[in-house]
Amino acid sequence: MIAFENIRKTYGKTIAVDGISLTITPHQVFGLLGPNGAGKTTLVNMAVGLAKPDSGSVNISGLGSPRNPTVRLNIGVAPQTLSLYNDLSAEENLECFGRIYGLRGAQLQERVAWSLDFVELRERKNDRVKKFSGGMKRRLNLAVALVHNPEFLILDEPTVGVDTQSRNAIFENIEQLKKEGCTVIYTTHYIEEAERLCDRVGIVDRGKLLALDSVDALIKQHGGNSTIVMEKADGEQTVETQNPIEDILRLQNEPGLLGFRVLRPSLETVFLSLTGRTLRD
Amino acid sequence: MNIIWTLAMKDLRILLRDKAGFFFTFFYPMLVAVFMGVIFSGAGGDSGSHASALSIYVVDQDSTEISQRFVDTLAHSEELQITPTRLEQAQEDVRLGKKAAYVLIKKGYSKARENMFTSAAPVVEIGIDPSRRPEASLLTGLLLKYGAQDMQQVFSDRKQMRKQVQASLQSAREHPVGVSANLESFLSSLDSYLADTTSSASERNGHWSGFEPLKIEEKEISRQRIGPPSSFAVTFPQGVMWGIIACTTTFAVSLVTERREGTLMRLLAAPLSSYHLLGSKALACFLTTISVSFIVMLVGILVFGIRVASYFKLALGLVVVAGSFVGVMMLLSVLGKTERATSGIGWGVLMVLAMIGGGMLPLFFMPDWLKALSNISPIKWGILALEGAIWRDFSFQELLPPYLILAAFGSVSFLVGARLFRWSEHT
């Protein structure tokens, strides 16, 4: 469990995080959504001990603050920036970070091999990272975060700049980790990723937590009504509805009707309704 | 310690795989040392040995008109630059290498010159370092040349010649029995005298000079070395310092690269303390610096024949210098936000410190005001710590000031750098 208790963080006059309280329960994938500059990265940095809250506290599994290096043993991080040594091979990167987390000997070799297999890079393990494609680097970035078998995994926009195949492979990796009981914090700009992967989602903006629940519950609470689109010979006509089936039955005898489509509210609708449509820098 | 070692080895592996970094760290200092050594070769410690006029002292113990005439002859020669002085002063300065040699005109010079036909040749002593054979031979040749000129003057001057003859007659008359007849014969007929040299008194008495213009005695004055024995003994410590500058800048930049590439963030999120991170960077920088210094000095010793006065002091000096510049690396790594800025600041600052600290122009070539200014440069103290072990033959007492200054400089730089690093990464 990761518990944020009324944490606040400012940089000069900018309030990055403004009194957020949040508990991330074990064995879940928790999605953190928010526009640019919402405070997601600051929240993640405080979760891994990189930033110190001005007030409030962060507690990892009841062990204490992640500012304590021992507590950080339980956390794996895959930063948004590809944090890899380009002049080392994939295997050397994994060995280096494995040693930093205290792995040695056979245990180290076993975890390195497992990580390479997990992200399907075993055949390229001896190649230097600088020769890797963007997708391969992203997968290795994930493998490095997993090499010490952490209880908590923090993924900061792990699919930025990768092709569809690599993105799908990363999704499958995360679903596999979830099955194995790993707790994942997942920040992303891609709403459909959160819809596919996350058990619970927190939407933050301007340093505040605007909403926190499962995807379905958020849609129910903030998504508004569904929309029925009637396809006619002379064009389309939309009708807002709280009960699509009932209304479709009512509208089925409309003249010139060719068919229906139902647009259900999505997480994106929720996101835009909570954070607005104004462009962010 | 395991973690520090792991991170340090990672840095060394990355450095070795970076071809440009490897070249500038390991080969560039060697090129500097060899290039500068070739430029300065011959100009290092034997100042004056290649000058157009040989600078010597002249000591006139005879102090007569004749000896003074010889001194004047030497003074007007183009090949010599003479300074009259006392014998003690001349011996001391030749020993210290301030003058190439001295010429001593011994007492009795004028008497020997006046009694050319009956006495041994006038005696002149050369005091010179035994290792300076070329200068000794040159000086002997010049003295014989000007001695012969002096003698020729006597023969070509009627008054002088008559004076010579009269003096010789007087000397002969005072000589033991049986001499005067031959001399009377000689003086009446020079030809018959020369034809009958076997019966001359001077031959029998072992004083026949054969009209030798001078008798030159050579006295060895072993020179006390106060300069470097070769130009490479000066330029290789400079090369070591350039290697250390390259390592310092390379590792300062590597910390900024880690920040840019995000690996620093990953390390900071790992169960490490700042002590581990900074310690590993310092260890990697120290090991590289020591390796580079060792390789440069090894090439200097094996290939360029540098003789080291004390290997222990050299090793100690390298450790102190390397340790000090690890501190400088730490400070530089937090001064720039980008690799370009850090590299610019690093090379800019260290280049200036190298220029005023003897990294380019050797310290002993510098004017006094620049020597005074060089005290602010750790490069100067680094070079002094190395030269002290290689050719200055410093005692530990003499090495202590450079060691302490370097240690203080390195410690303060490291502490300030570490403080700024912690502040910038954890706020």
Image (cartoon, grey):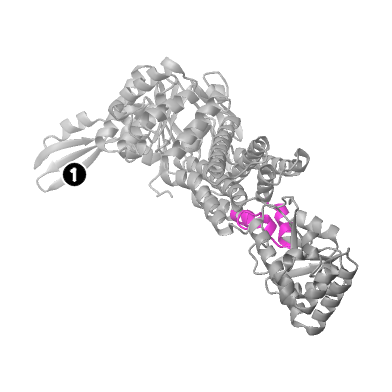
Q: Is residue A211 left or right of residue B4?
A: left
* Name of the residue lying farthest toward the bottom: B158
Name the residue at 54% across, 56% down: B38
Q: Is residue B366 left or right of residue A206?
A: right
Mark 1 surroundings within 10 Å by alpha-carbon count, few (fewer than 14), some (14 through 19), many (20 or more)? few
Q: In which image quadrant can residue B199 be found?
A: bottom right
Where is the N terminus of chain B found, in terms of image quarters? top right
Amino acid carrying label 1: it is Gln
Foreground residue among B358 and A246: B358
Q: Is residue B386 above or below residue B208?
A: above
Identify the residue under disc 1: A237
Residue B368 falls inside the magenta stretch: yes
Where is residue B407 drawn, in percent x and y? 70, 40
Q: Is residue B143 above or below residue A130?
A: below
Q: Is residue A97 left or right of residue A7?
A: left
Chain bearing mark 1: A
Q: In which image quadrant can residue B50 be found?
A: bottom right
Where is residue B124 drawn, in percent x and y? 78, 63
Residue B129 in view, yes or no: yes
Name the residue at 37% across, 39% down: A189
Q: Which residues are magenta?
A: B351-377
